[in-house]
Amino acid sequence: MQSLFYKYRIFFGVLLVFSIIVISLFYSALKPKKTLPIFNPSDVNPELVDTTVQYVANKHFISDFSFTNQNGETITQKDYEGKIYVADFFFTTCKSICPKMTTNLVDVQKAFLHNPKVKLLSFSVMPDVDSVSVLKEYAKINGVVDSKWNLVTGDKKAIYTMARKSYLAVKQGKPDEQYDMVHTENFVLVDSKKRVRGFYDGTNKAEIQRLIEDINWLCEN
C-alpha cells in the first residue's frame, strides 16, 4: 500500500490540491455576500423621523447644509461630496452618553486617519451653548483631527431639520418647545451618494467594530 501511494504520490498531491480549490470555490459561491441596506424614512423608528418625511419609502438623500465648525469655517455638503462619513449629534456639556460616544468616534477616526474617502461630522444639539470657541476646546481635548472631523454649530432650527429629516437619528423634545431635540446614541453611516446606510449604537464597542467593518465594505464597493 505504501509503495502504491509512493508511486502515485504526484497524482494524489494534484488531486488533493484540486479538491481544496473546488471546495473553496463552492464555499465562496454558497457563502452569502455582504450587503448594506439603504435606509429611507419609512424604514426607521417614527420617533426619530419628522412627520413630513415618514412616508418616503425610497430615494432618500441627505439634504444640503451649511454650518460652522470648530475653526470658524463654513462647512457644507460640498466638503463631504463623494465621501463616506459618520454623523452624530451631541453637546459638549453632556455627561451621560456623549463622552463614551466621543471616545468611540475617536477610535473610528484612528481607523481611517489615512483614508481620504472617510470623514466624520458631529452636530451640536445645543448650538446656543456650543460656540466655535467651545467646540474648538472640546476638539483639542478629545484629539479631533481637523482635516478628518468637523464639529459644527449653527442655527438650531437647521440642525433640528437635518437631524430629523435627513439623518433620521434624533428624537423630538418637549412638544411645547419648538425645535427641541433629544439626541440619541446613534451614529449614522452615510455613503458617497448621500444615502443612509446604517445606524450604530455609539456607546457600544461591538457596534463600533461593526461600523468600521461596514465603512471598509463601502470603501471597497
Image: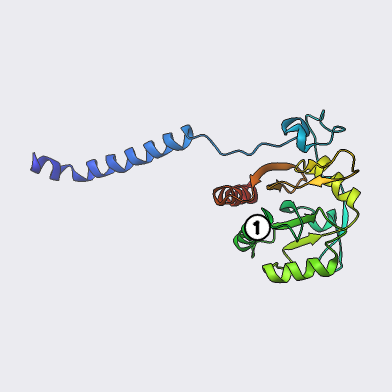
Query: Label 1 belongs to which residue?
Result: 105
* Residue 153 x/y as whole percent: 85, 59
Residue 77 in view, yes or no: yes
Please identify the quarter of the rendering in which residue 119 is found: bottom right
Q: Nearer the viewer, residue 130 or 25?
A: 130
Q: Residue at 85% across / 50% down in the picture?
A: 159
Asked whether, in this view, residue 216 is left or right of residue 136, the answer is: left
139, above or below 169, in the image = below
**Left or right, 13 with reference to 87:** left
Q: Residue 52: x, y in percent?
A: 88, 33
Judge whether residue 71 can be spotted in this image.
no
Q: Quadrant of residue 6?
A: top left
Residue placed most toward the observer, 87 or 19: 87
Looking at the rendered structure, the secondary structure element under dot 1 is helix
Q: Quadrant of the N terminus?
A: top left
Identify residue type, mark 1: Leu
What is the number of callouts on the image? Answer: 1
Among the 4 quarters of the image, the one containing residue 104: bottom right
Q: How is the image coloured?
A: rainbow
Q: Position of residue 101 (x, y in %)?
A: 65, 55
Q: In this view of the protein, which residue sits in the foreground, 85 or 133?
A: 133
Residue 156 in the image: state x and y as whole percent. 89, 52
Crowd around label 1: few <14 · some 14–19 · many ≥20 (10 Å): many
